[in-house]
Image (cartoon, rainbow, N blue to C red):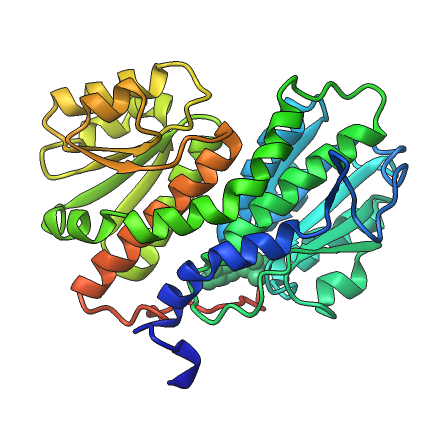
Amino acid sequence: DAGKGEYDHYMLKEIHSQPTALSNAIDGRVVDGEVSFEDLPPGTFADVETVQLVACGTSYHASLFGTHLLRSAGVSADAIRASEYEPVSGPVDERTLVVAVTQSGETADTLDAVRTASDRGARSLAVTNVVGSTAAREADDALYIRAGPEVGVAATKTFSSQAVTLALLSQRLAADLPEATPPADSTAMLEALDDLPNQAESVLAESRASALARELLDARSYFFIGRGLGRSVALEGALKFKEITYEHAEGFASGALKHGPLALVTEESPVFAVYTGGEDGKTTTNATEARSRGAPIVAVGPDDHPLADAADAHLSVPDTHPVWTALLANVQLQLVSYHAAALLDRPIDKPRNLAKSVTVE
Ligand code: G6P
């Protein structure tokens, strides 16, 4: 298939197109150290009191990422699985901004959640990849992630583009809200963005994920842990792994491991521990607990960290701002899933029972 170019699968092509997708998502959106969106001028969000990100699947994990950043900037925010919107959304009014995070802009549960919120008076914003999609048309405003078409059912580049776009949106919202308290390193975060596409390129060029996937292929279960932003990456890493390998994989908050999942940890359950360099040592402690039960530990994060030394294997991520470290760790995990699925000879671009866009509730 000519569309795959030099790659065996669309998914691999899309993983490798992330440096370009990231450049496109960023292009022209940071001007003189400030986030600037063409159609959302300063003051656009001045009335917003709380933000609800609604999404499904990978987009939900990107929403957790975005919610973490909004809260770090002192903005009240929640990520809600779109299918759960009605039971859990709580009070909603005209000062609620509901953000539909949806690659396709066509996911039925997400559209339904936005319609429910709009009926209650909320203002809506679609963060989507597809211009003219239903979400983009129905929401009050649209913000495009500019990832280009994604064919593989398992979302890859669109997660990265969503994460960057939501990080920028969190800064834009915080700038509009006088009560917001952006973290002291916000400027450093935006400055570090310039290097992100090249850093993604170097992860792709130097990753040891293929060899590691082969080494770990006989396991019974695969666990993914992380804290804060690392948690959203751990959940996404596990989703990707199960979607395309058909192997059992689960993602947990690092601290949740000891409250149940540890009972499942054996020498046949590798644990991928995601860290960003910005957190304290708790993920290291949690990973070490799993290791003492015999589980092989794979550290996924920057080199200069105790977890990289303590682990059985290490997938290295360039040293940058912790927000972008998390995103680069996700690229490493995408490669692990892809190579494991390729070794197992799975139909990577079209996993059984799954659809690229789920248009039924
Ligand atoms: C399906 C796809 C996932 C995707 C999810 C949400 O489950 O298989 O890859 O993350 O839908 O799709 P959306 O288009 O709303 O981001």
The quadrant of the image that shows the N terminus is: bottom left
Kindly identify the residue that appears in the image at 72 percent across and 67 percent down.
134
Kindly identify the residue that appears in the image at 17 percent across and 63 percent down.
343
| Residue 311 drawn above or below residue 203 | above
Residue 7 picture location, percent across and down: 33, 72
Q: Which residue ends up furthest to the bottom in the rendered image?
A: 1
Residue 177 picture location, percent across and down: 83, 27
Kindly identify the residue that appears in the image at 20 percent across and 19 percent down.
289
Residue 277 picture location, percent across and down: 41, 23
Residue 165 picture location, percent across and down: 64, 46
Horizontal side of 42 relative to 76 (left or right) equals right
Kindly identify the residue that appears in the image at 19 percent across and 21 percent down.
310
Dividing the picture into quarters, in which one does residue 9 lie? bottom left
Horizontal side of 250 relative to 15 (left or right) equals left
Residue 61, visible in the rendered structure? no
Residue 51, visible in the rendered structure? yes
